[in-house]
Image: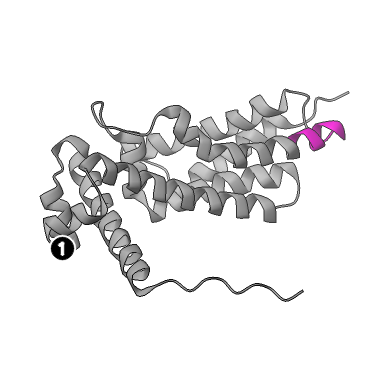
């Protein structure tokens, strides 16, 4: 059966998506530099080279822009992480793929990670529960891989889902430290340390 052609977007839809993308890119830069509280829609408009009124055609408020920035990057990161995990082989390789994907994206989008992890209180950051929703699918993939590894005695017998979330939390903590301080280690050194630490911790107990 022939594949159905995707509906063609109208010129208005294309322009709308392009404008929203421009605004999100500009807002990411402004929020990362100023923080949510100090940032203004005027500054976002200036960076985007758009009139302030044009911004309000696409977003009702600064808060809506802010959450659009986070949602946009979280979804991109979710897809990237899933692709990397799916392409990896063993459970340990999938864990390594997860860690590498998060660190690599952080280096590419430091503005996003700074907003997500360093933003002070008072900003309308997506709730922790909502933010973790973007992690749920990658963590589920890790859980399944860990369960399979445990069942064949390739990994220490620990609760698989708790272990998968622990991998996610350790990775987040390492990224927060890099963003909040002046690191004395390279990105590669941090990745390798975390992977080596987990490999040793997850190694099956000697019988």
Determine the main secondary structure of the stretch shown in magenta: helix
- Between 41 and 200, which is closer to the camera in this rendering? 41
- Between 53 and 207, which is closer to the camera in this rendering? 53
Q: Is residue 160 left or right of residue 178?
A: right
Q: Mark 1 points at which residue?
A: 50
At 64% from the left and 32% from the top, the residue drawn is 164
Can the viewer see residue 186 in this picture? no
What percent of the width, then of the height, locates residue 32? 25, 45
Q: In this view, does 114 lie to the left or right of 174?
A: left
Which corner quadrant of the image does residue 154 belong to?
Answer: top right
At 47% from the left and 28% from the top, the residue drawn is 129
What percent of the width, then of the height, locates residue 172? 47, 35
- Between 105 and 83, which is closer to the camera in this rendering? 83
Q: Quadrant of the C terminus?
A: top right
Q: In which quarter of the image is the N terminus?
A: bottom right
Q: In this view, does 161 lie to the left or right of 147?
A: left
Write the start and end of the magenta stretch as one range: 146-154
SS for callout 1? loop
Q: Is residue 148 above or below residue 12?
A: above
What percent of the width, then of the height, locates residue 194? 56, 37
What percent of the width, then of the height, locates residue 101? 54, 50
Q: Is residue 149 magenta?
A: yes
At 52% from the left and 35% from the top, the residue drawn is 133
At 50% from the left and 33% from the top, the residue drawn is 132
Q: Is residue 126 left or right of residue 201?
A: left
Can the viewer see residue 171 in this picture? yes
Which corner quadrant of the image does residue 161 belong to?
Answer: top right
Which corner quadrant of the image does residue 141 belong to?
Answer: top right
The crowd level at tag 1 (other Cα within 10 Å; few <14, some 14-19, many 20+) is some
């Amino acid at each position: 059966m022939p594949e159905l052609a995707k509906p063609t977007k109208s010129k208005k839809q294309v322009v709308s998506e392009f404008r929203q993308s421009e605004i999100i890119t500009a807002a990411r830069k402004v929020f990362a530099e100023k923080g949510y509280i100090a940032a203004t829609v005027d500054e976002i408009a200036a960076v985007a080279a758009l009139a302030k009124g044009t911004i309000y055609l696409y977003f009702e408020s600064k808060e809506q822009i802010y959450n659009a920035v986070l949602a946009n990057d979280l979804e991109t990161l979710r897809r990237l992480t899933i692709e990397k995990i799916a392409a990896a082989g063993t459970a340990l390789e999938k864990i390594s793929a997860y860690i590498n994907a998060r660190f690599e994206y952080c280096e590419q989008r430091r503005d996003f990670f700074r907003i997500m992890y360093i933003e002070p209180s008072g900003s309308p950051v997506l709730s922790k529960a909502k933010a973790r929703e973007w992690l749920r699918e990658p963590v589920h993939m890790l859980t399944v891989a860990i369960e399979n590894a445990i069942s064949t005695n390739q990994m220490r017998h620990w609760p698989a889902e708790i272990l998968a979330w622990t991998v996610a939390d350790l990775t987040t903590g390492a990224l927060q430290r890099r963003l909040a301080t002046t690191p004395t280690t390279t990105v590669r050194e941090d990745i390798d340390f975390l992977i080596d630490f987990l490999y040793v911790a997850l190694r099956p107990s000697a019988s």
